[in-house]
Amino acid sequence: MVDLRSAPFHLDDDAALWVQHTLAGLSQLEKVGQLFCEILWDREGHDPEHLFRRIQPGAVMYRPASGATMQENSRTIQARASVPMLIACNLERGGAGGNGGLTDGTYIASPMGLAATDDPVSAYRTGLVAAREGGAAGINWTFEPIVDLDLNPENPITNVRTYGSSPDRVIAMAKGYIDACTQSQMATTIKHFPGDGVDYRDQHLMASVNSLGVDEWEATFGRVYRELIAHGASSVMSAHITQPALSRLINPDLRDEDILPASLSRELNFGILRERLGFNGLIVTDATQMVGFTAALPRRVAIPTAIANGCDMVLFTVNQEEDVQAMLDGVAEGVITEERLDEAVTRILALKASIGLHVKQAEGTLVPGAAALQVLRQDEHVQWARETAQRAATLVKDRDGLLPLSPARFPRIELVEITNEDTSEGHLPELLHLKSQLEREGFDVRHSEEVSHPDESLSVAAYAADVDLVVYFANMKVSSNQTTIRLSWDDFLGSGAPKFVRDVPALFLSFSNPYHLVDVPMVGTYVNAYSSTHETVDAVVERLLGRAEFVGISPVDPFAGLEDARL
């Protein structure tokens, strides 16, 4: 049973009545439509009208686009929909950046950058920017906050997308984000249940494993989910991650080969989320194009099984006609009972009512006017981004006392760029910004190009006489569908590799990944900034020059447990 009056919905009489009357007026096909959250790209050929080919979906998720484009799409979608739609986006870093958001919005910081401030106000401000700027574009549902625990430095997808490894800090930061969204009528999502960050693999590429025992899970991920559910999280994203210990706790007779990822698991959705954690809100799968979902069961079986086994909404279709038919077949064949179908749709409608979509539809205010977009990158938001960068920058070590830098000590700097982004058309703008800032201070800065030298042609003495300081600018960003985020050099004989740190002082600046000391333990001075923006570059430069202190507190072990990295 769905309790419309309790958390996270808290519906009054009118809202509860709207849910009940709306459900009663839906045909079976219309109910099935509500179970799907579609995707809309800002690409040629992706028309919002295409979302309605066979069904009216219950929701849509935007991929990155300008605020104006999103607002126009929102207006088209909501005008087309008889039941107001949830419009979702990844807004983990404010209005822009990361794995989604408005391309012209305000990028505050990565979640780990927020956590490095050790102040939930940073997360609250980020949630407020997400709600303000996203709301201006018609977005009413954020797939945030991410509440994974970054327990494995080799995981290529959690990393700076998390608030770190401490349950206390994750809970505090997530509460700040949720509070801001709740006050702004923006629905929230905590993810990725049962918890990413234990395995070293990417759940986009397979069903990864949360291998903790029951007691350890309860003390970490379980505590996080329990507290945030009690705090009012609107929805939970059930991920393509297995949790064998919890699955066997609920069903001791499960065979290894029958353990399913959470997105398909009756044990994890009903047994853990609903019963043990008492979650009354909406459960949505993670993206169903991901291999962790598609490889678990045949797709025509997996789609209805996700709903039958406890999820209320399926994220994305591969082929709308096929997936909708699979869901209809699942209902006709009894995989999804009428009771289960109504329960899932009730939760979807209740979430919509909890953020006032039924009222806004009646008032014609589901999507604000064009003037609302003036909130994007407003002065207050940009100032918050600057303040966050200043408080997040973390000095991990300064073994050789290089800091503070000055042109008198290190007049000639060689700048080495390390990135997994496309630089075929030139250097990263943030690296160029760092170069200009240092040159403004009187340093002579040159770019280093990776060049191979046979040993007999390289003069270490000449190199040391020509360069006073090597500065490594690393921007190895987290993104889906990669197996690792490790440093590699084009040629171990190349001049760019940090092989001469005892001959020429070296400073390593990481703007995206906190764990690069795994690959450059020999570097004596190392800084983590967690996000690659002009604001973080400015904040780091001020602290390198000694004009301000590094006050960031690392949310993870930047040495990854390696003693040589500490030296």
Image (tube, grey):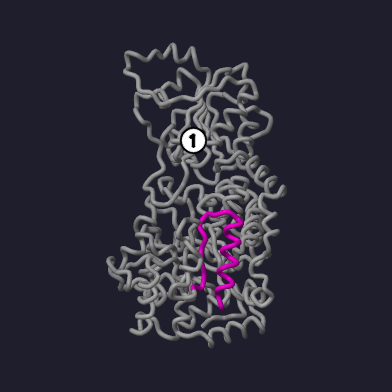
Residue sitting nearer the eye, 82 or 206 = 82
Label 1's element?
strand
Q: Is residue 563 depicted above or below 453 in this figure? A: below
Q: Is residue 58 depicted above or below 372 in this figure? A: below
Q: Residues within 10 Å of mark 1 (few under 14, many from 20)?
A: many
* Amino acid at circle 1: Ala
Number of numbered discs on residues: 1
Residue 119, horizontal then vertical, whole percent? 65, 50
Residue 149, horizontal then vertical, whole percent? 49, 54
Q: Which residues are magenta?
A: 57-82
**Along the horizontal axis of the image, is 164 left or right of 254?**
right
Residue sitting nearer the eye, 204 or 153 = 204
Q: Is residue 185 visible?
A: yes
Residue 374, horizontal then vertical, whole percent? 70, 54
- Seen as rendered, the residue at the extreme front is 45
Residue sitting nearer the eye, 487 or 68 = 68
Asked if the magenta segment contains residue 323, the reply would be no
Q: Residue at x 46, y 47 (%)?
A: 478
Q: Is residue 250 visible?
A: no
Residue 197, horizontal then vertical, whole percent? 44, 53
**Along the horizontal axis of the image, is 252 left or right of 139?**
left
Q: Residue at x 34, y 57 (%)?
A: 206
* Snapshot quadrant of residue 19: bottom right
Name the residue that disc number 1 marks: 474
- Seen as rendered, the residue at the extreme right is 380
Asked if the magenta segment contains residue 72, the reply would be yes
